[in-house]
Image (cartoon, helix red, strand yellow):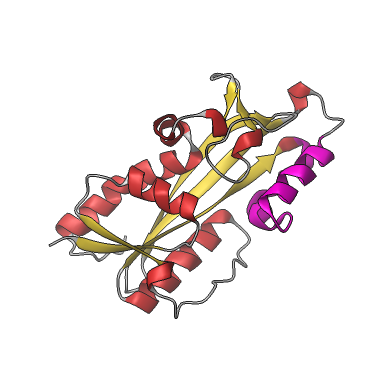
Amino acid sequence: MSSILVLATRNAGKIAEFRQLLSGLDLTFRTLADYPDIGDIEEDGRTFAENAVKKAVSVALATGKLALADDSGLEVDALGGRPGIYSSRYAPTTAERNAKLLEELKDVAVPLRTARFVCVAALADPHGHAVVRTGVCEGRIAFEPSGTGGFGYDPLFFLPEHNKTMASLSDEEKNRISHRGKAIRALRPVLETVLREYGGRIPIP
């Protein structure tokens, strides 16, 4: 019998990436859409890790199932690391967030447009125990959007070694190099061990 893993998000893009990155495991995926009584979980942590753990633990406790959450964002060096943990709240919509970023960087030269995507993924069990893994993808901010794939800031995140933005990569390419891909691949063996050896419970270190 497959185990249930609740993906603690309503973001369709994240859900698709989680499912692809965890394919091949004997899991039945659920999302917050399957648990409408769980309202929005306030992301009031000071770090990506605090927010990811809060979401994963809250959902695991509410559902009695293993839960996977992540908190991720864009850190731009010329902006002192902003928008960082506030990436999804930088402006009301994706289009407005991207437009605001370009406006803030309009006079910044290419060498100073360095940035990185950061993802912290957290796996939590119904006892409130959690484990986290981090993934980072380095790049720089383009001067205009390019590409139709991905979501969020992907059309503006340029990868010099690929000579294209994150939004111009195939799903397979993105999952191989992205911050979320790295974090989930690092967490996957932990999940496998928890399912195989500990019956869905995360052992306390």
Look at the picture and state if 197 lies above or below 174: below
Q: Is residue 85 left or right of residue 3?
A: right
Q: Position of residue 204 (x, y in %)?
A: 30, 64
Q: Is residue 112 magenta?
A: no
Quadrant of the image occupied by residue 166? top right
Please state which of residues 7 and 85 is positioned toward the viewer in this rendering.
Answer: 7
The furthest residue to the right: 107
The furthest residue to the left: 1
Principal SS element in the magenta part? helix
**What residue do we see at 55% from left, 18% from top?**
161
Q: Position of residue 126 (x, y in %)?
A: 32, 73
Quadrant of the image occupied by residue 64? bottom left
Q: Is residue 189 left or right of residue 70?
A: left
For the N terminus, the quadrant is bottom left
**What residue do we see at 34% from left, 49% from top?**
19
Q: Is residue 84 magenta?
A: yes
Q: In this rendering, does residue 80 appear at all? A: no
Q: Position of residue 90 (x, y in %)?
A: 72, 54
**What residue do we see at 78% from left, 41% from top?**
79
Q: Which residues are magenta?
A: 78-105
**What residue do we see at 53% from left, 37% from top?**
149
Look at the picture and state if 201 lies above or below 76: below
Q: Position of residue 203 (x, y in %)?
A: 27, 63
Quadrant of the image occupied by residue 2? bottom left
The furthest residue to the bottom: 37
For the C terminus, the quadrant is bottom left
Look at the picture and state if 92 lies above or below 168: below
